[in-house]
Amino acid sequence: MSDAAPLDGLRVLEISSFVASPLCGLTMAQLGAEVIRIDPIGGAGDQHRWPLAPSGTSIYWTGLNKSKKSVTLNFRDPEGQRLVADLLAASGPGGGIVVTNAVGRPWLGYDQLARVRPDVIHLQILGHHDGRPAVDYTINAGLGFPMITGPEGHLGPVNHVLPAWDVACGLYAAIGVLSAERHRRSTGAGRRITLALEDVALAVAGHLGFLAEAQLTGADRPRIGNHLYGGFARDFATADGKRVMVATVTGRHFADLAAATGLAGTFAELERLLGADFAVDGDRYEHREVIASLLTPWFAGRDLAQVAQGLAGTSVLWSPYRRFTDVVAGLVADGGPEGNSMLHEIDQPGVGPVLAAASPLEQDGRPGPAPASRLGGDTAEVLAGLLGLAAPQIRDLAERGITG
Amino acid sequence: MSDAAPLDGLRVLEISSFVASPLCGLTMAQLGAEVIRIDPIGGAGDQHRWPLAPSGTSIYWTGLNKSKKSVTLNFRDPEGQRLVADLLAASGPGGGIVVTNAVGRPWLGYDQLARVRPDVIHLQILGHHDGRPAVDYTINAGLGFPMITGPEGHLGPVNHVLPAWDVACGLYAAIGVLSAERHRRSTGAGRRITLALEDVALAVAGHLGFLAEAQLTGADRPRIGNHLYGGFARDFATADGKRVMVATVTGRHFADLAAATGLAGTFAELERLLGADFAVDGDRYEHREVIASLLTPWFAGRDLAQVAQGLAGTSVLWSPYRRFTDVVAGLVADGGPEGNSMLHEIDQPGVGPVLAAASPLEQDGRPGPAPASRLGGDTAEVLAGLLGLAAPQIRDLAERGITG
């Protein structure tokens, strides 16, 4: 086994904003790639996005731009634009990689950049497939999930809070870059890739069966609150005012739940009465309300500790519902970095000491998270290192407003 | 540019179930890798998961196992277990890759498989970081999102319907394999990787600022319905009973929305009265209710077509809410495969002709989606092709119940 970071030697230029493209760069940076985020002077549209630290620094921006270098250039000046091409040309054999969500900038397009770097791997993130802009929340609205999310009986859409499509898009983008780079190492050939947020959402919803189900049945799934479609999983209230999520995705899970709650005999009799087999997903789903009703008193009669005790040693999958503050308190109590080697305390300028995550891909050679640079904080170093510019040239660029 | 599929020559053994690990294999298969899913005879726990086609075939299983080969072996018999190791050993220079979410099976572990294939890339998906099993819905409950999702004023958790952590986990897994394989091509060294669903969720929530915000402020975000935290985005009802999601994530978006709705003067006056600047994210967020109240009549007075007309040509990001049936009808109306080259009609055995998605990574050489194999349908071909077994040997294995 190797103990080097797996992407050592890869160099990526990221001209990005918001979630998807910054997450792509972050994901590769946390596996050892050198990722240089290039922003317009003053920052892109995500520079001040909430949540903010008391200092006004964006927790969001610093979170998504950990472990990267930050360069700022005047994107409106042809000289600033040319510097991007120069950096690409000079980025070495593991370089020649551009990830961007910027649109309407021909100087950042594949055709232009392939002139200076014929083997460029150019990944363009779009909103809609046809190039119209979009964000996670508009894509999600157009897809169908908000109409089947939320409490049974609720009318109207329920948006998700996690920008799940942005996250998936950023990860797909990293897959796109890595697969293209693999191929380039065999053939020397670059690649032009486009990745639309809309396509990510359609593909994933398709892979999971949401689209084929609608196409085949002509019907939409009902809104079923916190139940799991096609199985038995639901939330229950405990005696001490907590709530737990309980999931049985196999027959064994359900049999264990029945035994642990003392309801094995009751459920067996109920199966006989209903002509059902609760080892079968669909039967558990069809009779979810009566199953839940029978289980409710067991949870309502126990506090969280007793529920934990009652389900210990069984295969039943369950978890208390927590708030983010509970999660953080738990991580700190678990020893934070000591309890999980993914987590480190970093001292993020503008934010202070905070827990931050390395890549969830646990392996030898996994780098710890490094704080985000100050916006533009690496401009001089990158221009000197990659382009060989001397200090007076770098000063001149700054004085003329080409770099910031 | 190359027009070959980027992962041509990669060969992956996937011993998997449910969402994350099958999505990992699917993602690589759709970029040209040969992915062989190996199941126990009769299938894994996800074989019959909902949604189901009228025939009883799982739309879900076939959706996540497109473009793969399917092999079934008797996992309880040492001879079946040894066949997995034999297939790994024989899988060639682009092989030696195992992705699995199976636990408690030492014969599938890194240590055992590295004996037959010292350069193995072994990616083990776990539930919790400490190895305890978990599913998306229990991880999500434990993290904090359900307590801030759903209508303002609603009490109790609101689960997500999209298994977003499973999706992210599957994509991270593909990134893990591709980055490890890149490194192996340089060094010859294999890699042992573990990826916990819990860590994926913690890392992503961390990168997006949810954890640091809770750590720094000691407080949880409020439940704000369909509003966007830290900006102005919300849903509105139209005159014809539809709903639209409208998002302004930059000052320009908001200025365009104000102009398009004839409210530029009103908002300017309101900014003056409130001492606010709606070009700033936080000010739009703080005054989201009054902003929404002023916009509501504009949407309520127009049907969807008029809303579309009124917002056309502006930078405002918006979308009608659709149901999955609307999406499918729209895709079919757009010409399906003709409207978006990612979508193809495939004839999925057991399901029938359905729209299916290729990889959202649009590029030359992108393979179209191929139907999922019948469970075990490629066993004989794979044993013959990789292990060189002759027909009588393959028949003997089947007769003795080692293959299925």
Image (cartoon, coloured by chain):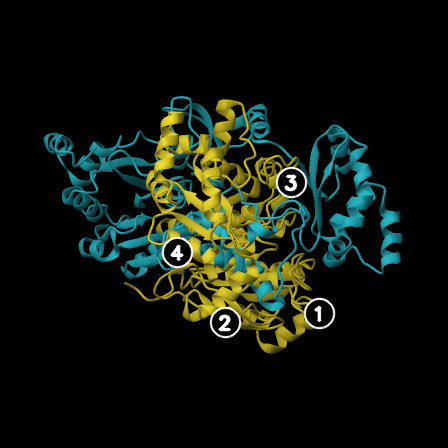
Chain colours: A cyan, B yellow
Whether labels 2 and 3 belong to a single chain: the reply is yes
Identify the amino acid type marked 2.
Glu
Identify the amino acid type marked 4.
Gln
Q: Alpha carbon of mark 3 to alpha carbon of mark 4: how far?
A: 53 Å
Q: Earlier in the sequence, mark 4 or mark 1?
A: 4
Mark nearer the viewer, 2 or 3: 2
Image position of A134 (left or right of A259): left
Q: Earlier in the sequence, mark 1 or mark 3?
A: 3
Mark nearer the viewer, 4 or 1: 4
Residue B201 screen position, x and y as percent: 53, 40
Nearest the viewer among B94 and A116 is: A116
Mark 4 = which residue? B309
Mark nearer the viewer, 3 or 4: 4
Labels 1 & 2 near each other (Cβ < 8 A):
no
Identify the amino acid type marked 3.
Arg
Chain letter, disc 3 residue: B
Quarter of the image that includes the C terminus of chain B: bottom right
Residue under the point 47% across and 56% down: B304
Chain letter, disc 2 residue: B
Q: Earlier in the sequence, mark 3 or mark 4?
A: 3
Labels 1 & 3 near each other (Cβ < 8 A):
no
Mark 4: which secondary structure?
helix
Mark 2 = which residue? B345
Mark 3 = which residue? B132
Residue A162 screen position, x and y as percent: 51, 42
Whether labels 4 and 1 belong to a single chain: the reply is yes
Q: Earlier in the sequence, mark 1 or mark 2?
A: 2
Quarter of the image that includes the N terminus of chain B: bottom left
Residue A103 higher or lower than B280, as above or below: below
